[in-house]
Image (tube, helix red, strand yellow):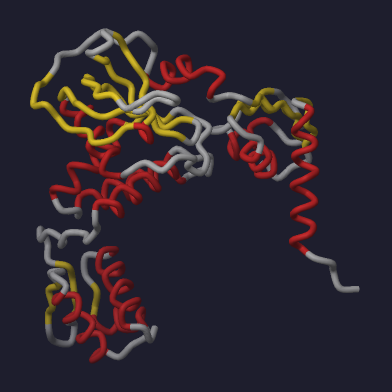
Amino acid sequence: MSDPGARTLRLLSLLQSRRYWPGPDLAGRLGVSVRTLRRDVDRLRGLGYPVAASRGVDGGYALAPGAALPPLLLDDDEAVALVLGLQAVAGGPVAGMAETSVRALAKVAQVMPARLRRRVEALRAMTVPGGWDGPPRDVVDPAVLTAVALACRDTERTVFGYTPPGRGRTERTVEPHRLVALGRRWYLVGHDLDRGDWRVFRLDRLDSPRGTGAVFGPRRFPAEDAAAYVRERIGSAWARYVVEATVAAPADQVRRRIGRWATVTGDGDGCRVRIEGDDLDWAALALGVTGAPFTVLSPPEMGDHLRALAARYAAAAGTPDT
């Protein structure tokens, strides 16, 4: 391995995987000389990683026991992106990835600076997945996202500006409850003190959240959970399309692939799929991800949409050589 940066990362990974490495064995795994290995170890030490060395015929290297690894260098936006990415994988349909992603997120959080760790742990704990997640539709400021998550966790009354569609901006005072990621959008569920009732706020319409310092007590929540409440409140505004199809594959197999985005029913070699969403693109992608032949039952416009997609993809592929 000739690239020093890549080799240093590989060296750190090897040292973390075993309590002690004989020097020649470690050099052999990296494909370098023992002398180059010593330089790489010095580079790791310069970055703050505590590597202990023992000399002699049986000499080798180990990460010093009980020593803390240096903080992970991320800015606020990068930390939020990392947490959201790992959370998305943890809740995804790929078998075996959920547990791995949760472990990775826990390890990454441990080596973040305290300020960032507090923010990302609040975001992780206060977010309720609503299902049918796809690429984000709206741009949400990471600072707004983490500020609201902290207010939810700390049960702190919060003031922010809010601009509903077709109306002007107003100042709202809210007791924030949970964040919900649903239908490619972010929502805040909270008790609006100005309206005297529970409300749902789209985060892309929310600005300048700031805590008041006042801590509030628990209220009875009027739904099974925050995601169910958001789905009930936004209703058809979220699920503009309901796509139904049959898929020529066992239900368990299809559920493993797209169960997060769809309702899958049936036994035997085929199954029925129902996908709700605010456009047809994501439904087309989900059906394609099944990896099996499928037939669309409804709505009629889904057939036209698939034919248009097929024509675009065929044009992109070009004419095969003969």
Percent of width and height locating residue 31: 37, 85
Quadrant of the image containing the C terminus: bottom right
Could you tell me which residue is drawn at 75 percent across and 26 percent down?
Answer: 299
Could you tell me which residue is drawn at 21 percent across and 20 percent down?
Answer: 173
Q: Quadrant of residue 174?
A: top left
Percent of width and height locating residue 135: 51, 44
Q: Quadrant of residue 307?
A: top right
109 left or right, relative to 267 = left
Asked if residue 156 is positioned above or below residue 314 in the image, the reply reads above
Asked if residue 43 is positioned above or below residue 264 in the image, the reply reads below
Q: Nearer the viewer, residue 151 or 129?
A: 151
Q: Can see residue 25?
A: no
Q: Can see residue 266?
A: yes
Q: Nearer the viewer, residue 265 or 33?
A: 265
Q: Nearer the viewer, residue 315 or 229?
A: 315
The residue at the far right in this view is 322
Could you tell me which residue is drawn at 80 percent across and 65 percent down?
Answer: 318
Percent of width and height locating residue 268: 75, 27
Could you tell me which residue is drawn at 33 percent across and 21 percent down?
Answer: 189
Asked if residue 134 is positioned above or below residue 157 in the image, the reply reads below
211 left or right, relative to 296 = left
Q: Quadrant of residue 44?
A: bottom left
Quadrant of the image containing the N terminus: bottom left
